[in-house]
Image (spheres, rainbow, N blue to C red):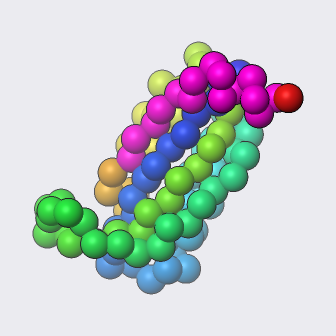
Amino acid sequence: MNNYEIMFIVKGSLVEADANKVAENLEEKIKSYKGKVEKTDKWGKRKFAYKIGKMTDGFYFLSNFSVDPLKLNELVGDIKIIDNVVRYLVIKLPEKAQKEKKA
């Protein structure tokens, strides 16, 4: 299993409790692929640098997780269809960071 990081933005038109439910839904998706969520940081509601559609703000989340690399494409496909996720970015953490976490 490889370690990854995902930053995602949830629509700012939601109340904070609903935005947190979207984040929990995403964590459940990761677990459904036999992945493990290390931690999720909630950055709160922030203004965008530019409009995305007609939106000017959103709730930001940053999660570290591990999942089988063969399942990552399926997971990303599921993330694309989660309602209220405006943007997301998944990156693989460098090998050095992965070894440090195991130690």
Residue lying at the far right in this picture: please name it.
103
Location of residue 54 (image quadrant): bottom left
Relative to 52, 23 lies left or right: right
- From the viewer's perspective, tell me whether residue 52 is left or right of residue 98: left
| As drawn, 40 above or below 32 | below
- Residue 98 among those drawn in magenta: yes
Q: Quadrant of the C terminus?
A: top right
The segment highlighted magenta reads 88-102
Q: Position of residue 27 (x, y in %)?
A: 63, 51
Image quarter in which the N terminus is found: top right
Q: Residue at x 69, y 26 (%)?
A: 98
Image height of 39 relative to 97, above or below:
below
69 displayed left or right of 84:
right
Give the image location of residue 68, x and y in percent. 66, 22
Front position in the image: 9 or 28: 9
Q: In the depicted view, which residue is nearer to us: 2 or 67?
A: 2
Identity of the residue drawn at 32% across and 78% down? 13
Residue 74 visible: no
For residue 29, side relative to residue 75 (left or right): right
**Residue at 63% in and 19% down:** 95
Relative depth, front residue between 84 and 10? 10
x and y percent of residue 38 in the render? 72, 46
Residue 87 in view in this figure: yes
Q: Residue at x 24, y 66 (%)?
A: 48
